[in-house]
Amino acid sequence: MGSGWFLDSGASFHMTDDKSFFSVSGVGTVIFQMEHGARITLTDVKYVPGLKRNLVSIAMLENRGYDVVFSKGKVFLRHIFTR
């Protein structure tokens, strides 16, 4: 079971092997807490038995209005509000 969450630029969806996150079998919503304390709600997280790391899909974040920027070994997320 993966204890942390890892950003993955190749993942098609968010995924975890931790069943405790789900109230409905197979797909759920997870509150992801970043190092500095900010929280992001991940929706449509898939349950994948045997997965070694919990993965956060960069493509899904971008599709939901986040800028994902990698700089000097760090990642920065910014939610862009559209009107």
Image (cartoon, rainbow, N blue to C red):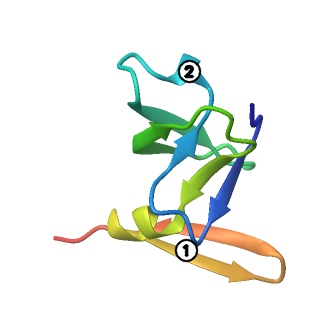
Q: Amino acid at mark 1?
A: Val
- Relative to 72, is 65 on the left or the right? left
Q: Nearer the viewer, mark 2 or mark 1?
A: 2
Instruction: Please report the residue visible at 64 percent of the width from the left and 70 percent of the height from the top.
Output: 76
On the image, the x and y values in percent for residue 10 come to 57, 71
Task: Give the residue at mark 1.
Answer: 68
* Rendered location of residue 59, percent (x, y): 45, 70
Question: What is the count of numbered marks?
Answer: 2
Of 27 and 33, which appears nearest the observer? 27
| Quarter of the figure that contains the C terminus | bottom left
Q: Residues within 10 Å of mark 1 (few under 14, many from 20)?
A: some
Q: Position of residue 26 (x, y in %)?
A: 41, 29
Left or right of residue 64, residue 71 in this image: right
Q: What secondary structure is marked by label 2? A: helix
Three-letter code for the amino acid on which mark 2 is drawn? Lys
**Residue shown at 83% from the left, 83% from the top:** 72
Could you tell me if residue 80 is visible in this image? Answer: no
Q: Secondary structure at mark 1?
A: strand
Q: Which mark is residue 19?
A: 2
Residue reaching furthest to the bottom: 71
